[in-house]
Amino acid sequence: MGEIGVGMLGYAFMGKAHSNAFKTISYMTWPPPLEPRLVGIAGRDEQAVEEAATRYGYEYATGDWRELVDDDRIGLFDNGGPNALHAEPTIAAAEAGKHVICEKPLGRDAAESFDIWQRVAATGVKHLCAFNYRFVPAVRLAREMIEAGELGEIRHFRGRYLQDWADDASLDTWRFDPGEAGSGALGDLTTHVVDLARFLNGEIASVAGFAKTFLPGRKVDDAIEAAVEFENGSVGTIESTRLALGRRNAFQWEINGSRGSLAFDMERLNELQVFRADGDRARGFKTVLVSETDHPFWEHWWPPGHIIGWGDTFVHELHHMLRAIADDTDVAPYGATFEDGYRAAEVCDAILRSGETGARERVSYRSL
Amino acid sequence: MGEIGVGMLGYAFMGKAHSNAFKTISYMTWPPPLEPRLVGIAGRDEQAVEEAATRYGYEYATGDWRELVDDDRIGLFDNGGPNALHAEPTIAAAEAGKHVICEKPLGRDAAESFDIWQRVAATGVKHLCAFNYRFVPAVRLAREMIEAGELGEIRHFRGRYLQDWADDASLDTWRFDPGEAGSGALGDLTTHVVDLARFLNGEIASVAGFAKTFLPGRKVDDAIEAAVEFENGSVGTIESTRLALGRRNAFQWEINGSRGSLAFDMERLNELQVFRADGDRARGFKTVLVSETDHPFWEHWWPPGHIIGWGDTFVHELHHMLRAIADDTDVAPYGATFEDGYRAAEVCDAILRSGETGARERVSYRSL
Amino acid sequence: MGEIGVGMLGYAFMGKAHSNAFKTISYMTWPPPLEPRLVGIAGRDEQAVEEAATRYGYEYATGDWRELVDDDRIGLFDNGGPNALHAEPTIAAAEAGKHVICEKPLGRDAAESFDIWQRVAATGVKHLCAFNYRFVPAVRLAREMIEAGELGEIRHFRGRYLQDWADDASLDTWRFDPGEAGSGALGDLTTHVVDLARFLNGEIASVAGFAKTFLPGRKVDDAIEAAVEFENGSVGTIESTRLALGRRNAFQWEINGSRGSLAFDMERLNELQVFRADGDRARGFKTVLVSETDHPFWEHWWPPGHIIGWGDTFVHELHHMLRAIADDTDVAPYGATFEDGYRAAEVCDAILRSGETGARERVSYRSL
Amino acid sequence: MGEIGVGMLGYAFMGKAHSNAFKTISYMTWPPPLEPRLVGIAGRDEQAVEEAATRYGYEYATGDWRELVDDDRIGLFDNGGPNALHAEPTIAAAEAGKHVICEKPLGRDAAESFDIWQRVAATGVKHLCAFNYRFVPAVRLAREMIEAGELGEIRHFRGRYLQDWADDASLDTWRFDPGEAGSGALGDLTTHVVDLARFLNGEIASVAGFAKTFLPGRKVDDAIEAAVEFENGSVGTIESTRLALGRRNAFQWEINGSRGSLAFDMERLNELQVFRADGDRARGFKTVLVSETDHPFWEHWWPPGHIIGWGDTFVHELHHMLRAIADDTDVAPYGATFEDGYRAAEVCDAILRSGETGARERVSYRSL
């Protein structure tokens, strides 16, 4: 099997999640499309990045991401850095001919996101915006059921991403710095909701909503509320907040169609709620434990019923990227490309505009 | 104990629910504030109303509600008729000196609702708009917890009322007739969501949303979507639909505050989900079975854990009205008055206006 | 429609539940098979029974149940008294030609239960042992599904009835008096589990188990544990306790067959969990809200999704008895007869014997 | 940090799970107590074991486990082979001075299990019987709560392990061969239930139960049912089956004490249900998502709410073993030793004896 050199930017939350995935791919997906070789890892805190290199097995650490871009052994650049560091390194890596992965949100707003997409697309490399929740088995199963028409015509999508960790005014990370993060719950959580809304139900046509900041002194939004209409005529709501006490990672969505409904909660990510209007006298939502041999991604794992974890979704995601590189297949539609990253940003920007103008905003998308 | 004569308009769904409640109050609430005497029942279909009188034990049936208004033995007029029949009979009964109950929505829009409120209030009788969900024990418990400050400062209210019975274009009842019903999911379901939003979280300041009709030929809305802001600064969403397949009576709401959260689903109306940010290492949402001796309304019922049904909420509601009449106490704040009926209508109208103008609409309320 | 005079023994928990049911039957089941006329109510505390007569509308109260037995206007004698008062009044009423209902457990042991059955059966009246949980819609639906073969061959039944109210050594009611009650959790809860086990899965062939008393000074059992085998070859467990903190009325059972499984919890009595081995890729347990127009007993109630309560199960049960009287049809198999009451007692006695002998005990049943 | 050479016997289900854990420990637990070096892997199918060596990164593969025993570079022998291969290789490895891990059941019956324990204990090496469910965070949290007295005096433990994969008479693996497996559900599932029963609630004093085989031609038990008493006086049931359709890996247990209760389901292994009798008006079972920074094992993983999977429990387990080796600390009480493996076997044997004799069997344990 072939090998691909990986260069990682970032060693914290996403650096850990992606590094674990690359290491796991080597043996849990068998044979892997390409053997990931962990070449270099970059970060601002030199001591921390040195330790990360040792810990995860990167051949070297560096304080300068440009070193990764210049390293010919690296064929895949994976950007897990803060949002402000998405654009320049990702574009530089692509322009150096490396395939690129960038964490979400792609850019800090639609303009920056478009720029990243445009410049990376021009290079011809593979690009993946790391909306890992597309790679939850239950989410992929939902997508497959919808594509097969099992829900009929879709009428509703309602999604909310509820967390509560930010209810502390003393928190001081880049995630609360408008320059570093671009936004608060919007870029962090709403982008996920928008991406799955698009993944499952197609493009969003218009939004009516707003951002809200609760904590004194906080410079980014704490919560986002919006009523939305999709291009297929379905309607619903999109919400996100980091102040819903008791909800730790509750990315919940529900979709209702003319033949059935689906519902999901990330805190129980192995389960999909499925309703079929099939006339069964015993009708109701099924709790499907998405861990069967004929379920998505399950060929990599355990006997049915032996559930997987949040970290394992990255195994599926990065495996998909390696497959695309190895076989020169498209990242889309099951993986999110930079175009998807850009389109999510357009919806997010439209929500902010709606909040500012007080008007329902149509979402329009630029093409290359 | 005293007695009060009851005149009922309507013999179908709500007529059955209210008649059952009056009969049950006589012995399940003990002693009842007033003994309800079922004097007369009115309805358009004379044969059906005759049968209803026999069934529920009314002394007579009539095809003309004015007969009830003119009957001096009747001290309480209960209007469970179609929406178009709310205004005239209710006002007439009040002007004849009878206390009045009117099913929700109070009127078909805010203007009609205001008119009913204004004219009834002028008479000095007691008036109750039958938002029975205020009388679910779990909802009352939630209200009491919020009033006691147990949730702290409220940040979010999200409510959705999901049903699926209207997914049939051949259905032909007054509920799909704009003249009879005034609206679709809006008056039927959204009013309930708005009323509990107000009951639990105070006035709604602005709405950004719209109505949607899916079924060809349908003349009323099938669904309502809105992002909302409350006067207390909290934000959230309000949704309702009669096309969410698999959801039969899923009136679900969640409220997040700075000290805790609550969540509820009418399909499990005996349960309240309670999260307290109390520092317990074992933290999470409790499933509270609201059936303890120290829980609201439970003095009327069974030993703890022996759950009640949807129909029993009307026992609590009408008992509350009889108590207000017997003791000359206020229907508010635990019962909904006609002012509450009117205010819910203002919010509903604002959602429709927002859908038409495309602008976020402030909600303003008229006073008497 | 005809009328039947009802004489009630007992005015507390079961007296309230049965009286409510008779009053509700008059109009919620329409037309009722017979109109119940509440003639007389008997109890030991004369003041309390007088108040109960006023409250529930009995024509008279009496301190002596023999007065009911002697009253020719009474055609149905309903025994909701303490266990020690089941035998003599019930037999006397039957021998006076009255149809009889007796609360569970029928007698305080199998011998007494057999005697009641034998002597009542000899009179030819209708007899119903008030195992009301057969009349939970979800339980009846389960029975219908099993009868129709939808589960295939049954392999397992596991049932447990968990409450926690008895965790207080100071409690002093007839339920803790061996003479009055006969036993503790055994007669109170285990009989229910055994009855539904038999109702859903047929006769129990053998038991290996024991009783346990935890609280110092308590003279009846607090808990029952048993491994059981059924005549059809299926196996499982039967448990009951009044010391499972946090479980208020958790009568939970699960049944597994070769084509599917069912599960149930009385704290969510409107729901049945249904698994079908039907090859659907989206497989799992359905949460069926048993409230559809084609579900058992639902013709009496509300639109789908508007759930009923624990007290409503008595409406179904007593309606079934009135139907059997009116039409001279059998109480069995959907209602429990005194034979069912006796057979449950045989299983309970066998568990006690097993605890004493340390041996697995076969259950044998006497015939008339 | 030090290094330890690992020799693995078995390359299928458990070989994969353990190999993944060793590889993950290297970086997810940081720093690991010892760096596991994957030296050799043994198995009967030479081609398959060769592939496994390549896949998981063992330095060599062999068809003869004795080669591992003779390899001085190996300091830890991990036996994930079929049950019939537990005794000889494990004893040989220990006698060669290697620390040993053996999958459950330790032996095929109590006698063989005792022999393994006795002979391994005599060598002085560390030994761990791989009851991995002790290392589920929710299970460890339960243990810690019970140890701290948060449940008070325990009254009940009920445990059931329900699977359904064996409902196919054509299945032909070593798990259905009495010589290879020793037993069916008993050794496979009941041992797990017994181990957690002991882990959470102490020794089992007596059992009354039996084994059952349903499928024609099957030579091992399909299901186990037992009523049990513990040495602390608490009582309950222990069940296991591989024929509970719809239950995929439903290892469910509940424990009730005088101050609270806990409940758990392995299909939702990140959650612990917690009831505290603390007098809160809002009382009920909490759904605790066991993923907080102060929860067991969570220092290795992700931010709260980002759940882990079944496979990750092995990371905790093997990390515990490496820590015990590195620091010369005891495997007990949080890890299961071979004594625990033996004691579980005594309980299992007692259930079989009870089924044969029809008598309640006391469990007695041999000492070294």
Image (spheres, coloured by chain):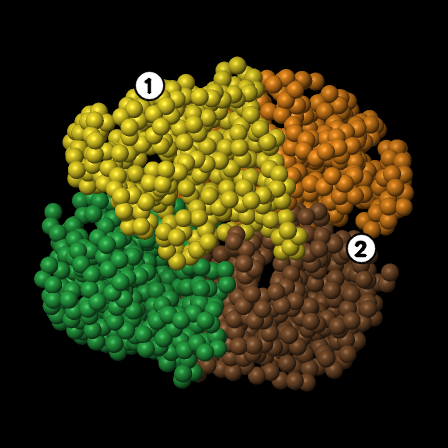
Chain colours: A orange, B yellow, C green, D brown
Residue B32 % position (x, y): 31, 47
Mark 1 — residue? Answer: B179
Vertical comparison of C286 with A120: above or below:
below
Res B122 → quadrant? top left
The residue at the point 28 percent across, 28 percent down is: B97
> Where the C terminus of chain A falls, by quadrant?
top right
The residue at the point 40 percent across, 76 percent down is: C220
Res A140 → quadrant? top right
Of all residues, the one furthest to the top in this rendering is B357
**Amino acid at dot 2:** Trp
Categorize mark 2 by other alpha carbons within 10 Å: few (<14), some (14-19), many (20+).
Answer: few
Structural distance between the alpha carbons of marks 1 and 2: 70 Å
Say what secondary structure mark 2 lies in: loop
Residue C87 % position (x, y): 22, 73
Vertical comparison of B2 with D60: above or below:
above
Vertical comparison of D173 with B258: above or below:
below
The residue at the point 27 percent across, 66 percent down is: C45
Residue D259 % position (x, y): 56, 65
The mark tally for this picture is: 2
Callout 1: chain: B
The residue at the point 59 percent across, 31 percent down is: B232
Categorize mark 1 by other alpha carbons within 10 Å: few (<14), some (14-19), many (20+).
Answer: some
In the visual, does C307 lie left or right of A296? left
Residue D109 visible here: no
Mark 2 — residue? Answer: D30
Residue C46 visible here: yes
